[in-house]
Amino acid sequence: MPITAADMNDSELFFQRLDQLLTRIEDILPTRIQHADLDAHIAFRWRKHDNTGFLQAISHPHTITLNELLNIEEQKQALDRNTQQFVSGFPANNVLLTGARGTGKSSLIKALLNRYADRGLRIIEVDKQGLTDLPDIVEFIDQRPERFILYCDDLSFEADEPGYKALKVVLDGSISTTSDNVLVYATSNRRHLIPEFMHENLATRHVEGEIHPGEATEEKISLSERFGLWLSFYPFDQEQYLEIVQHWLSQHGISRLSGPARQEALRWALARGSRNGRVARQFARDWAGQQKLAKAE
């Protein structure tokens, strides 16, 4: 039976409508996200899209070095030793870095990536919302030859947050053992990572001279205790702060901390209510920029 022009028009209309239908279906389907190439980068960030997690490469990791971090020598040595053990395939601990803000906790981890990247060290930054995916991340990198630090910056929780439980499980609480090519390095301003309240201490009991914390306190301590190594960071005194200012000014070509620069650096810290490495670096940028601008005019 011959195909008529009407039949051809009907077929074209059918395929047009089918194409439109497929386009609409594609629009509502989740986008397929590819993980970053683990062989091509040294630093990654765990991201979510449509409830699907994936590794995103960090194209320009921070280039700070250990020599640029001043007045935290004990902390540097301890974390460097632990990281060297890790990249060498020897036993090493998960690490919790706590204490005063701006004293180099995060910068220290970034500096160690720069030191040991050529020995296979890699970093995956995981924010608090991504902690529930930690088991998936660990499983994804399980058979990789590199050594991965899961980096959780500025970590703190409320007691009922899901990420709190997920982190406890990954650190030391699952029936399965975490791969030996993964460690967790976390920074926080809180030693126990979650708020502690005075009324919780009222449940503490004294039994035959021993102190027995209440259940609420025990629960809060239980997460931080899963980190094998604790490193504490303390505020800098005035001379330490000025030493760091001088260091960062030298990076901008200013070799001497002049009297005016010293006074302005102290005012800068006073206005921010803190003497720390971050404040010192910010001042150095501002002062160096002002001097260079004045010379250019």
Image: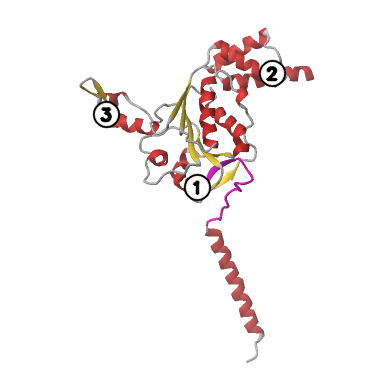
In the image, residue 216 lies in the stretch drawn in magenta: no
Question: Could you say where residue 138 lies in the image, as x and y percent from the top left?
Answer: 48, 45
Question: Residue at image x 58%, y 71%?
Answer: 18
Q: Check disc 3: other Cα within 10 Å, few if <14, some if 14-19, many if 20+.
A: some
| Contact (Cβ within 8 Å) of mark 2 with mark 1 | no
Q: Which residue is mark 2?
A: 250
Q: Main secondary structure of the magenta part?
A: loop
Query: Which tag, 2 or 3, sits closer to the chain's start?
Result: 3
Q: Secondary structure at mark 2?
A: helix
Q: Secondary structure at mark 3?
A: loop
- Label 2 and label 1: CA atoms lie apart by 43 Å
Q: Which residue is mark 1?
A: 142
* Quadrant of res 66: top right
Q: Which residues are magenta?
A: 30-48
287 lies above or below 178: above
Q: Nearer the viewer, mark 2 or mark 1?
A: 1
Q: Nearer the viewer, mark 1 or mark 3?
A: 1
Q: Is residue 277 visible?
A: yes
- Left or right: residue 228 compared with residue 89: left
